[in-house]
Image: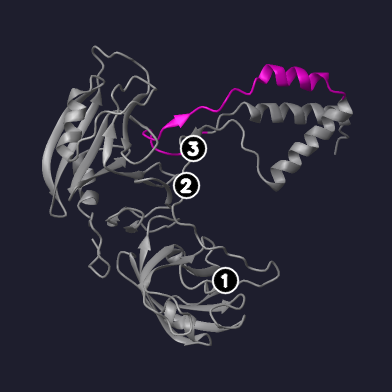
Amino acid sequence: MHDLDMTQFEERLESRLRLYAGIEVRPASPRLIAREAMASRRRSGLAMAWVSLRPPVRLAIVFALLASLLVGGLLIGSRLLRPILTVTQPSPSFDVPSNAPLGGPAGEDIRSRWLANVGTIPGLGNGSGPVTLTIDPTGSVLALANLDPGASFTSRTSSVAGDELRIELVSDSGGCRAGAEGVYGLVQSTDGSRLTITAVSDACPTRSVALSRTWDRTLVGPTTVGAGIVDTFDPPFAIRLPDARYEARTLDDFIEIADPGSGFSLIVFKNPQGFADSCSTDEVRYPYTPGAGAFVDYYRQNDAFTVIEATPLQIDRHDAIHLVTKIRVEGARCPGADLYAVTPRNCNCHFYGGDDSIYLIDIGADTFFFQLSPTTDSAAEMPIINTIRIPYVPGEPSP
């Protein structure tokens, strides 16, 4: 091994850090998501300040930067989505002692967020209502949310067999003592959208009552199965997407369910509204009129786009329109600019438009906007669009 002079090490490390600082990292999301560039870092000023430092000081800074990478991660050169996307319903906290041996793990196909309506459970004092069950992405922890405070039943998990799960209570919860063990049978629907859990044995009776039921997979959290429901809208809806490694992002009356690996995504708005001038960044909104037809009219009058198709159809027995648009090239007022096209009416946000294929569904007084990305053609999209069930009703057959 060759000896490396500390000055050479510092120079090489400095060079490597400068290289990474120049890389722009972009989030993997469809082109419709609005983005704003981060403020300039004034690289030239930073470089001059760096050069003026004495070598020992510079080396100390380099090691401090490496420490920050190891401890918390350093986001360099990213562009932020605008506005910041948030999950509307918090996931349960998986607070498992670091010295606790974890069983190994629950199957990947059940690692998801699940939803069920739960009645009053004797010993808990909870009221009837929706409850979420989350099996974390590692398959090692199970927890419930929205039961009585102190009744999350956070448990370590391990597979007994392909259709059985062993769980062990991490800490006192729901009237049961830490360490209480249970074994449960698991049966999934053919498409994976439903999971029926049945107690084989459980030393914690309240956990047994809470878990033993049929659960619906939600697409609002990480999942590797694409069939499920979206419960962050009123009314909720069900859809069957191709199986992939999905993550979800939400805003008011908006969700994006995307596979970062392939770039495939579903975007849904409620009550879409346009902008008065798609070439302007002022975000002055076009007057809102309810209905899918009114939204098509907005596009027809918009001089930044051309309506290629506006075909009436039925989706889940509801009146709908398939709207296809293209950016107007001839006579465009702002060629090459991002075009402000649409926003959910109740969201303080904006999304860019382009050559798009949009499905508009009227549900009572509301209009739902569905878009698959990347846009292909209706022949490829309709097999997915036709699985939409809105409103979703618990217990109905899967789409």
Q: State the extent of the magenta-drawn residues as a range.
A: 26-54
Residue type, numbered disc 1: Gly
Distance from the alpha carbon under mark 2 to that under mark 1: 31 Å
Residue matched to label 2? 86
Q: Position of residue 24 (x, y in %)?
A: 56, 29
Q: Is disc 1 placed on a helix, strand or loop?
A: loop
Q: Residue at x 46, y 79 (%)?
A: 125
Residue type, numbered disc 3: Pro
Q: Position of residue 187 (x, y in %)?
A: 36, 75
Determine whether 392 is above or below 306 in the image. below
Check whether the beta carbons of the residues at disc 1 and disc 3 lie within 8 A of each other.
Answer: no
Check whether the beta carbons of the residues at disc 3 and disc 2 lie within 8 A of each other.
Answer: no
Q: Residue at x 11, y 45 (%)?
A: 313
Q: Is disc 3 placed on a helix, strand or loop?
A: loop
Residue matched to label 1? 104
Q: Position of residue 198 (x, y in %)?
A: 40, 81
Q: Depth check: 133 or 70 in front? A: 133
Q: Which mark is residue 27?
A: 3
Q: Earlier in the sequence, mark 1 or mark 3?
A: 3
Q: Depth check: 388 or 36 in front? A: 36
Determine whether 395 is above or below 383 in the image. below
Q: Is disc 2 placed on a helix, strand or loop?
A: loop
| Residue 216 found in image quarter | bottom left
Left or right of 5 on screen, residue 314:
left
Q: Depth check: 377 or 329 in front? A: 329
Q: Nearer the viewer, mark 3 or mark 2?
A: 2
Q: Earlier in the sequence, mark 3 or mark 2?
A: 3
Residue type, numbered disc 2: Thr
Q: Nearer the viewer, mark 2 or mark 1?
A: 2
Q: Position of residue 32 (x, y in %)?
A: 36, 34
